[in-house]
Amino acid sequence: MAPETLDDALGLLRRHGDEAKVLAGGQSLIPILHYRLARPRVVIDINALPLADIALDDGRIGIGALVRYHQLEESEALAGRCPVLGEAARLIGNVRVRTLGTVGGSLVHGDPAAELPAVMTALDARIAVASASGRRAVAAREFFTGPLTTALAPDEIVTGIEVAALPAHGAAVEELSRRAGDFAIVAVVALVSLDRRGHVEEARVAFGGVADRPVHARAAEDALRGREPSAETLARAAHAARDALAPPSDAFVSGAYRRHVAGVLCRRALTRAVERARR
Amino acid sequence: MIARLVLNGRPREVDVRPNETLLELLRDTLGVFDAKEGCDEGVCGVCTVLLDRRPVSACLVLAAGVRGRAVLTLRGLERDGGLHPLQEAFVKHGAVQCGFCTPGMLLTTLAFLERQPRPDREAIRAALEGNLCRCTGYTKIVDAVEAYVRGHD
């Protein structure tokens, strides 16, 4: 089924509920169907809905759920206002995934190691959600509730996200994966703004891959606020962030290794973010 | 369901199953074998085709979702029945061994060069990192692309 209006899509989803899956870019859903991990009776293809715009006004950025990763990479408007989105998008999957994969799809899929959930957590994004009974907005920091699990109800669709433009923040994304294009073993997103004295005004840090959902690293943010961003301060903040984590082990790496890598990558990301904030 | 596409410049309308992928449509119904089936999960790149000039994994696109857009497969690159100059460069530099990855390599390269016509070797390597080759060790593929890029300077 390929509805052409949001109301039609929401009506179909209300009617079919748990038996339906929403198809956007398909870069997670179609592999899931190939693996027979899900066998939905109905697939609701939302690609015809008008949710593919990037809107900029008054220091806010609105990104439609159907905006593709390559649009984040290539948008000059975003590069000037919130470059972390493009930097993170370049790390997603492979070039073919970035042609079709969507912002909304990444968020509702909710892979704990994916880039955009961590970015939205760092940016404190508002996720716009709609159902046949109305609209609501959910903070990204409350949206992810477990592995591949979100606060989205079965009859709801993500329609887009909204973030504050942060043109003065330096930003960096660091990640380690086993092979190019793999999900990250650890990913970290850091944004830093400096005051006139060159001290940290605000820092925002989030991790992917270290828990069952993205992790907002308050400890690192607190360790930086108001401080001069010397190498020692950044290392201390990265250690604080690392020490607050208890990452799981999996078939490839131990939790202890993951934790160590989180600290190293966090320091690198903060260092790069501060360099960029100084420019 | 009806799938509509413009395949290598020619409009087509074909009856498909709702869960049929573009790769199945190409290979099983239309007899277009230049897109290969590899991993079937979007990782290996051998089923790469260009959808509106951008690379996609044909195994991860539903045929009915193409909605009239342009699909380019390798045979769409032919020039008057001859090889495309990038194909010539692959032959000349020994970038083809078993050939299974080659269609995906060629199409990915051409889509990349449209956006970045003068890449250095590192950029070429990065552009092809989503296409796996199990024969060449990639060196000769990157050599071929580099030579093709230089030939266009």
Image (cartoon, coloured by chain):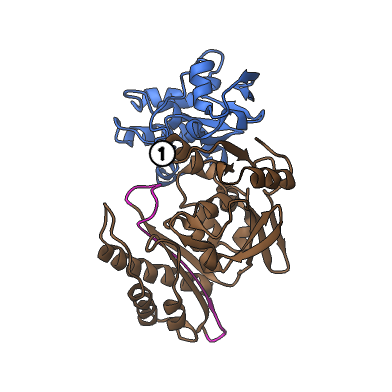
Point out residue A43 in the picture as x, y percentages from the top left corner.
Answer: 58, 38
- Note the chain letter of the blue one: B
Residue beneath label 1, please?
A: B43
Residue A31, located in which quarter of the rendered image?
top left
Q: Colour of chain A?
A: brown
Point out residue A11 in the picture as x, y percentages from the top left corner.
Answer: 70, 45
Q: Is residue A54 above or below residue A256?
A: above
Which residue occupies 46% across, 78% down? A221
B3 drawn magenta: no
Chain to which the residue tagged by mark 1 belongs? B
Q: Which residues are the magenta region?
A: A178-197
The residue type indicated by label 1 comes to: Val
Which residue occupies 52% across, 58% down? A150
Can the viewer see residue A270?
yes
Q: Which is more toward the observer, A84 or A119?
A: A119
Q: How many marks?
A: 1
Left or right of residue A165: residue A224: left
Q: Which is more toward the observer, A151 or A81?
A: A151
Residue B105, located in which quarter of the rendered image?
top left
A183 drawn magenta: yes
Can the viewer see residue B152?
no
Point out residue A135 in the picture as x, y percentages from the top left corner.
Answer: 70, 59
Left or right of residue B123: residue A82: right
The quarter of the image holding the N terminus of chain B is top right
Which residue occupies 42% across, 72% down? A271
